[in-house]
Image (cartoon, rainbow, N blue to C red):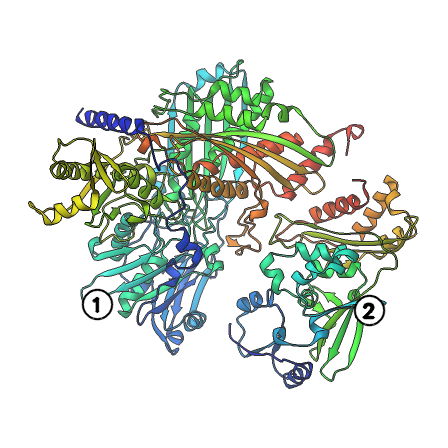
Amino acid sequence: MNFNTESPATREELLQCLRRHQSADFRLAAGGTDLLIELKKSGPEDLTLINLGRLEDEEFTGITIHPAEIRIGALVTAARIHKDPYIHEHFPVLHQAARSLASAQIREVATIGGNVCQASPSGDLSCALAALNATCEIIDMDGKIRHETLSGFFRGPGKTSLLKSEVLKGISIPVNQDETLMSGFIKIGKRLAMECSIVSIGYHFQMNATGTVIQAGIAIGAVAPTVVFCTRAAAFVTGKKVNDLTEEEQLQVAGLIRQAASPIDDLRASAWYRSEVLFNSARSIFEKA
Amino acid sequence: MRLRIIWLIQSFKTALIMDKKLKLIGKSTPKLDGSERVSGRAVYGHDIELPNMLHGMILRSRYPSARIKSIDCSEALELDGVECIITANDVDVNRISYKRDHPVLKGETVNCQRDELAAVAATSRETARKALRLIKVDYEVMEGIFDPFEALKEDARQINLYGKGAESFGNKNIAESFTYSHGNLEEQKKNSRVIVSRRYRLPRVTHCCLATSNITADYSVLDGRLTLYASTQVPFLYQRDMAHALKMDPSRIRIIQPTIGGGFGSKLDMYPFEPICALLSMKTGKPVQLLYDREEEFIASPTRQTMVIDLTTGADAEGKFTFREVRIIMDNGAYTSWGATTPFVMMQTYSSLYQVPACHFRADAIYTNNPFAGSFRGYGNPQATFSVERNIDLMAEELGIGKDEIRLINANYPGEITGQGLHFKTCGAKPALMKVLETSDYERKNREKQNGRYRRGVGLASMLHVGGGAKIYRSDGCGTRLKLDHYGYLTIVTGSSEIGQGSETVLAMIASEELGIPLQQIRVINTDTDIKPWDVGVHASRTSFVAGNSLLGAIRLLKDKLNLKAARLMECETGDFLYEAGSIRADQKEIKIDKVVREMHFGSPNELCVAEYFYEPPSSFQDKQYMGDVSGNYAFASQVAEVEVDTYTGKVKVLNVYVSQDVGRVLNPVGLQGQIEGGLAIGIGYALTEEMIYEKGVLQNPSFHEYKLLTPVDMPDIHFYPIETLDEAGPYGSKGAGEAPLIPSAAAIANAVSDALGVEFQSLPLTPENVLRAWSEKRQHEPANSRKV
């Protein structure tokens, strides 16, 4: 493994750095928890690592709360998301996903931007963010900003819409319209820590005073080439009292969630298992405790 | 006859020791090397740096089965910083391994993914790695044989060209074979009310030592001596094996063991990378270090035997066991390691775990193009115990008697001489069973069944293992040298090795107990074959037993000298004085121990305060039929596992494990607790998640990411109850305890999952997917209206 590193300290230095390396081989590195393993395997020669770890720019490194949205900078770590009281209270799905990610050591360095840009179908933060209808904020080397929904951003396993001239700046999540919530993250793996999801489900339902769902988000991970937002299942739940679904309705929504998946056999599990567990876990969301 | 008398005298002496009130033995004592290890001061093999040291790296085969047409190193040799490259053509060595069927470097054929084709020594690891990429190998790829049953077929090709299977065992691909029997099988079959036959399949798992394989070789061209910093657990056998491989005089080879970051049996054999590193040093005249990275560790370090066990067992109408008939096919992999001899231990379980009137056992190790399996803590016993304990549950179900009851009525007992000739002079089998049944509330939990998503179950299993060494080499003994200096500090030079099991601490505790010297004034020297006396090595849970007895023998001799001198100085009759708080006491008189030594050194007649002793256990070699009392004593244990199975995901959560183990006597409670918990971590991983996944001989999951070693948060609550049977053969009555904790775990957990779901399991691991699949199949066969979920 041989590479040069550049560590821009300001946004302008970062954009300059991007412009300078357009014709060369480079990678952006934040926590590096996935990237270093990848580089160790591929053993690259003459690669430049643009290290974002030294960047001092609040828009990349901070969490800010605005009237309509909460903005999480791309360099915010999983540990910080896990510990953030606003996220804990308003977006339990994201809080839980951050807590279930890898190990305490990795959570201290792994970033939300890294998790999203890796575009792993089993990315835990990505799955939770998709359930929250999050939007990516992308800056290009000339400083131009564009926004894209998370579902649009993911293009395949390891593939995003990000161009070589662009970098992910942050993620925005719309604030809750109502604060009666049913929100959580289910992660299925073989062990309780240091685990990569075999199946994951993020769900976030906002309800009005009568318990009727006014806004629903359901996303699934590790069961398709990308994290998938379950549009039909979310629509099915919207307008219903989610705590009072009949058993038939529960099975129906679990079925819709299963239909959104296209799992494969791999080392971790078979397609059969993923499909079964996805259905069972989906159902468990609506079952009375 | 003479041996017998000596043994009686020894027993008498140990009996005396047992009567004494103990001050330190039995009290929790932190490991002496603990602070060094956790603070990073301990020097592991990876920390060694010698002047002008080169870095070695190995080129392994791209294919698990191929003929080598040519190896071209010319381009690699031109790389700046490459000092030496060796292939099979460049070295004059003997084949290694216990069957001598393993070429150090492969020149004709490669037989598994691990096979070593060439090795580089370079000025940096980076350069060595680059050089490996420049070596060109021309292969003629062959179709590999990865299933031992395929390898046994008449038309299968001979996998290991040096195997002696055709002459010795009637099939070219049989590497090793064991047959054992006692009792009248046919008659016992007639006596049986129930006969259960099952086929069990056990997975391939690996040790996952935190420190990866490592060696630093330092050959001196001046005197032709070779110093190896090697993390072996059997330094003297290793020295002999290395000398054989390199065609050297063994005494010119010095083995120094750096701090060892985990052994668990993996370091019982010498592997090709070790003589390879020595050869690189001999060729370059410089020290060479060879370290595995984690991926290489998964690919190229040993594994537990994967095997297929066909077991038939019977019991009569009262539930008394009648017979066991077992046929085992082990996947030996491409070469034969000590691991092929695991049937030696397995047959003890089949013949003697519970009372067994008749037993027939045959196990064959079959060559395949898979990586070779080595030895691993438990040494075949987890596999054997899994099959025996599953069958017992099935027989109890068929007979309609309790799974606890059937085990109690068949339990081993004190004084029993088993069909194989194992003599259980003390036996905590039944007390251990009763203890776990009582503390786990087994009877109630076994009765209660749930219907919802989460279902609980309890499972019971026991085990038998050697507790006083195992006579498999000409000597199962251990030597000790003691030096007490004139400041009252004691140096223990022991033949035994510390691989993390805590034996150093136990030895220092014994010396402190006997000589009244504080622990802080005791040093244990145990890492250098030039200094330490013979010991066969760390295996068979033997170290505290043999090294402890050896130390006690040396202490007796040392005390004889001290008593004589002390009596003269205190002007009293010599006798069995009291050694306490750095002093020797007799009635009203007292003298500091360091003063006694000073008088020995500097007074007339000048003499040293040293002693040495060699202890050989009272065990005997088994005969050709494997009959005989192979160990100084035997360890027994039972475990109850309580699990909760999520029927939505198939995930098994182990809630509690109740462990009761006959350890003879507890020497160091905190050390023993560590062995129990560490053993269970391996046992639970074996039961639930660990598995090396191969596709046509190529490992698919060579990382901790995909090889699912459990983490601390996956561990259940562990409830441990030692049973003290005070066996006279062991130091203070103790027995070996290191391997036992993991041996019955997988069996107990599988029995618990079966209990929870009413589903039978015949293979491991019980991954969520395997459990959910079994559960789904069961539900498909149930009438729809009886479904509760």
Q: Position of residue B137 (x, y in %)?
A: 43, 67
Question: What crowding class fits label 2: few (fewer than 14 Cα within 10 Å), some (14-19), or many (20 or more)?
Answer: few
Along the line of sight, which residue is nearer the eye, A6 or B507? B507
Visible residue check, residue B498: yes
Rendered position, B661 above or below B495: above
The relative height of residue B425 versus residue B157 in the rendered view (above or below) is: above
Disc 1 marks which residue? B221
Which label number is shown at residue A66? 2
Q: Residue at x 61, y 43 (%)?
A: B767
Q: Is residue B205 left or right of residue B595?
A: right
State the image quarter where residue A68 is shown: bottom right
Q: Position of residue B782 (x, y in %)?
A: 74, 29
Please tell me which residue lies in front, B429 or B712: B712
How far separated are the C-alphas under marks 1 and 2?
A: 74 Å
Query: Could you tell me residue A16's position as x and y percent?
Result: 66, 85
Q: Is residue B123 above or below residue B674?
A: below
Check contact, mark 1 vs mark 2: CB within 8 A. Answer: no
Q: Tell me which amino acid carries mark 1.
A: Val
Q: Is residue B519 or residue B90 the one in the foreground?
A: B519
Horizontally, is B505 left or right of A84 in the view? left
Q: Quadrant of residue B395?
A: top right
Quarter placement of the C terminus of chain A? top right
Chain label for disc 2 = A
- Percent x, y for residue B303? 45, 48
Residue B108 visible within the image: no
Q: Callout 1: few (<14), some (14-19), or many (20+) C-alpha neighbours within 10 Å?
A: some
Residue ID at (20%, 57%): B252
- With B312 as the anchor, is B5 left or right in this view? left
Q: Could you tell me which secondary element the residue under label 2 belongs to?
A: loop
Chain containing the residue with disc 1: B
The amino acid type found where label 2 is placed reads His
